[in-house]
Image (cartoon, rainbow, N blue to C red):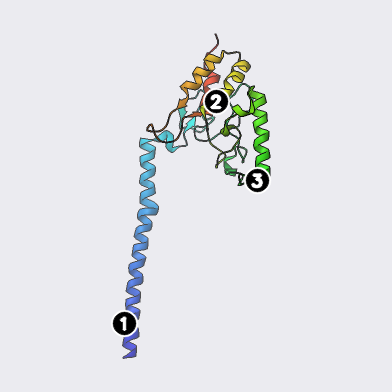
Amino acid sequence: MATTTVASDLATLTRHSLAGLRMLLAFTLVTGLAYPLAMTAVGQVAFPWQANGSLVRSDGAPTTSRSDAVGSALVAQGFTGAEYFHPRPSAGAYDTLASGGSNLGPLNPDLVASIEGRKAAVATEDGVTAADVPPDAVTASASGLDPHISPAYAAIQVERVARARGLSDAAVADLVARHTAGRDLGVLGEARVNVLELNLALDVADLRP
């Protein structure tokens, strides 16, 4: 009797184990292979630019070729020259492999000192008071790779960029306005300016009076 019970239990265990294994294999094929391949195919057909990294050429035009690309509309780059609009600070020095924040708390003395130092530097460079320096000019994003700045930060940089390039403030401000995106669907997020796209547009535009 005991032998029969053990054999029955083993048969039941084996049957359940095989059923579980079949389910594991089925879900692995569906969610680990078929679904990713299907989404990749849809992305490549319907949204090839976005699916390949939202790359842009030196003239600001979108491209799917890495050999033609000078950057991505989704990843910040460090621009330091007076003739360029500057992005937000980056804790990872704009390195995609070091993406992340400083992990310093808002009351950390090092962070407070860093923000005050950045605020003074921006105020001096752009000829404004420290009170006029917007928060995104002195604080890094969580990724350190935010490609956008606020219209307020772009606005205080207009005069410096125009002076360095020998352009009128109005011409540069107009270009900023043309590269300012509003809230998604009118309600999501905030107005923003893509720094890379704006700087590339400056390099190729004929704005001289």
Tell me, yes or no, if residue 61 can be seen here. Answer: no
Nearer the observer, 65 or 73: 73
Q: Mark 1 or mark 2: which comes first in sequence? A: 1
Q: Earlier in the sequence, mark 3 or mark 2?
A: 3
Identify which amino acid the numbered label 3 is placed on.
Asn
Q: Which residue is mark 1?
A: 8
Q: Return the disc, 3 or 1, that comes first in the chain's sequence.
A: 1
Identify the residue under disc 3.
108
Image position, residue 171 (x, y; %): 52, 14
Q: List the residue tagged with mark 2.
A: 154
Which quadrant is the N terminus positioned in? Answer: bottom left
Position of 37 relative to 14 (above/below): above
Point out residue 181 in the picture as x, y percentages from the top left corner: 45, 28
Which of the two residues, 184 or 16, is positioned nearer the viewer here?
184
User: Which residue type does callout 1 highlight?
Assistant: Ser
As helix, strand or loop, the secondary structure at mark 1 comes to helix
Q: Disc 1 vs disc 2: Cβ atoms closer than 8 Å?
A: no
Q: Residues within 10 Å of mark 1 (few under 14, many from 20)?
A: few
Cα gap from disc 3 to disc 1, whole angstroms: 65 Å
For image coordinates 56% across by 15% down, the residue present is 169
Residue 158 in percent (x, y) is at: 57, 20
Q: Which mark is residue 171?
A: none
Q: Secondary structure at mark 2?
A: helix
Tag 3 secondary structure = loop
Name above or below for residue 152 compared with residue 29.
Answer: above
Establish if 21 lies above or below 207. below
CB within 8 Å, label 3 to label 1: no
Instruction: Please tell me which residue is depicted at 65% across the width and 45% down the height of the picture.
Output: 108
Residue 109 falls in which quadrant of the image?
Answer: top right
